[in-house]
Image: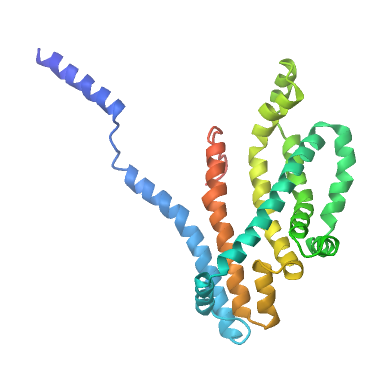
Amino acid sequence: MASSSHTRATVEMQQRDAVYPRESPLRRPAVGREIIGRILPPLMALVTVVALWWMVHLVFPRLLPSPLSTFRGAVRLLSEGGFFFHMIQSLRRVFVGSTVAMVFSVAVGIYMGTVVMGERFFQPLVVLGLTIPGLMWSLIAVMLFGINEIAPYFAVAVTIFPMLVINIWAGVKALDKELIDMSHVFHFSPWLKISQVIIPQLVPNIFAATRYGLGLAWKVVVVVEMFGTSNGVGYQVMKAYQIFDMEAVIAWTLTFVAAMILIEYGIINLVEQRVTAWRPKVEVWRR
């Protein structure tokens, strides 16, 4: 009788543990090590950059401001009323131009990867686009469209378009052939094949292209704003350059970099993790 009640109690405890699993005493240290492993390396990289910056400042104090004075300058920028206006103008130009380039690059990249004649037609044009610097496109855009919003949109889209196409094109050529064959067997329409087979496999390439495109787009936007706009981060950097205010130039640069980092980790990373949650993590050689 006692054995039967003991067995019943054991079964109940096992069922309760299955529904409400107990936290392992080793779990907390493991989570702590994971958090430290994620935070410590970027923090060490930041400290290294600041240390190198400080050493160069000690050697050339009149040429390069100290990290502390530059940080104070960035704080002053944040407290000014026009800071967010100029930052929003630059970010808007970056995102609009990048979005236009991404839409066309996905379409052209898929076309090049799936149609032989499309690849032969667009490949020399893409290579030609890769050889033209972003500075040239910025000057051409300002000369063509003048001081208005079309110039930065055009310069950004045309500059980053070939790079994005190369990324998407390479991703299409590396698709799983068995899935493509399956779509032929089930007689998928071209649109269904693209939306259900090709694009889901291109998600990592699209996010990689997005990161690369945003990083290049803001460089182009700054150049266009220096010559062809009356607002934005590039316009403010140009004003600081004309009076040789190195501290203001670096402060504006750091604030824009901080904004792009927040967008990377606060938006792009979260969206990518959510979209690619179904993909198994494969880490064969990473330690």
Say left or right for 185 vs 42. right
Name the colouring of the figure.
rainbow
Left or right of 242 in this view: 125: right
User: Residue 52's x, y, as percent?
Assistant: 56, 74
Q: Residue at x 73, y 44 (%)?
A: 167
Residue most extreme to the top:
1
Out of 68 and 5, give the one closest to the viewer.
Answer: 68
Splitting the image into 4 quarters, where does residue 259 fall?
bottom right
Visible residue check, residue 177: no
Q: In this rendering, is residue 108 above or below 62?
A: above
Q: Residue placed at 52% from the left, 69% from the top?
A: 78
Whether residue 269 can be seen here:
yes
Q: How many circles with numbers are drawn on the protein?
A: 0
Which of 10/96 is in front? 96
| Residue 140 vertical placement versus 79 (above, below) | above
Q: Give the image quarter of residue 280.
A: top right
State the image coordinates of residue 230 (x, y, percent, origin top left): 70, 69
Which quadrant holds residue 185?
top right
The answer to whether residue 206 is left or right of residue 25 is right
Q: Residue 191 appears at what percent x and percent y?
A: 73, 26
Residue 156: image location, x then y, percent: 74, 56
> What residue is shown at x 70% (from left), y 65% (from top)?
222
| 267 vs 225: above or below | above
Quarter of the image with the N terminus is top left
Outermost residue, left side: 1
